[in-house]
Image: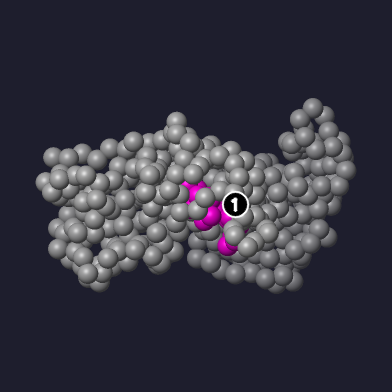
Amino acid sequence: MVTLTGKAASVAFDRVTKVYPGGTTPAVNDVSFTIEAGTLVTLLGPSGCGKTTTLRMIAGLEMPTSGRIRIGDGDVTTLPATDRDVSMVFQSYALFPHMTVMENVSYGLRFSGHDRRETAARAAAGLALVGLTGFETRFPSELSGGQQQRVAVARALVLEPQVLLFDEPLSNLDAKLRRRVRDEIRELQQKLGLTVVYVTHDQEEALAVSDRIIVMDRAVIAQEGTPRELYDAPATAFVADFIGESNVLPCEIAAVAGTTAEVRAGPVTLSLPARGLAPGPARLSVRPNRLALVDEGAPNSLPAAVAKTTYAGSRNEIAVETELGPVFLVSPDTATLPAPGARVAIAFAPAGAVLLLG
């Protein structure tokens, strides 16, 4: 029985820029990063940020205008897609409608020098990995969206690529199926030790599947790090808002002692990591779940008036007005829902706020 294994390789961009013919604005501008072999790294950002162009340059479907691209020990900057040991799973699945599941999965193998017996064995192993044994004779039209996506994944896996690329792979699935398929992709990646580069604009999806996330904004890297690093310590307001919901509030750094800053946000005083900032005006990022409603006049709290409340099943969503501007918070206490207009106050969790660098 054939056992599929990964041939994971690292991916490195060295000051890569891409300007499309006839254009003047770079789609990707002086981007550098390294993706370690055997990890899943997500390129995350809004439409037009450069993430898909970056993925296509890894695949060899686009060539950089300047800079170098390496896969493993090899410089692949000018290599066409056919000469790179990578496979891509497309947003549209790109299955052949007139071919059976087995024929779709076998398609790439037939052109890769494998004989008929090995092709059949590898295709069967790929279908077993994605849980589609028994579906060999079905056509794509007879499959659900999730099953079609699994066929596309199996077709890519059987080639045992050095790097496996996913371009918005779950965007055509409903919310519940997205969660299930993303978990299956992550499980396969870890089981086979694959290097995976994954493109999405969905921050929840990125947080759930990634070893590291590269957040892109307007053709450059805004920040990269682990999901927890980006969620807990965003560098900019853009990253704070894009990686989950965030309140960005004005504040004043009153003093800095070593690596700790004394920060004042209205009447609230906080001790926070200074992050290299000097005394003066600054901005805070605070996640909605790291704020709490307290009684008006509570010590070290920010006075507020309730503007809107929403019961959301497992939590209450509360919008308030403060002297620092509007603030959004969530509360797990669904037994009580404050009425609009009520005077309250907001308390900050001990590790609930972070100073923004830009």
In this picture, which residue range is highlighted in magenta? 42-58
Q: Amino acid at mark 1?
A: Lys
Q: Tell me which residue sits at (24%, 50%) in the image.
A: 111
Determine the image quadrant of residue 96: bottom left
Q: Tell me which residue sits at (31%, 57%) in the image.
A: 152
Image position, residue 229 (x, y; %): 59, 41
Determine the image quadrant of residue 257: top right
Q: Which residue is mark 1?
A: 18
Image position, residue 121 (x, y; %): 15, 46
Asked if the stretch drawn in magenta spans residue 204, the answer is: no
Q: Is residue 338 visible?
A: yes
Instruction: Tell which residue pokes out farthest to the left in this image.
Output: 117
Instruction: Tell which residue pokes out farthest to the top in this image.
Output: 258
Where disc 1 sits, the SS reads strand
Vertically, is 258 above or below 58?
A: above
Image position, residue 326 (x, y; %): 75, 63
Q: Is residue 186 visible?
A: no
Q: Tell me which residue sits at (49%, 44%) in the image.
A: 78
Q: Is residue 73 or residue 224 the one in the foreground?
A: 73
Image position, residue 15 (x, y; %): 62, 41
Q: Is residue 321 left or right of residue 111?
A: right
Q: Is residue 5 left or right of residue 329?
A: left
Q: Tell me which residue sits at (39%, 59%) in the image.
A: 90
Asked if the stretch drawn in magenta spans residue 46, the answer is: yes
Vertically, is 351 above or below 166?
A: above
Q: Is residue 163 or residue 232 the one in the foreground?
A: 163
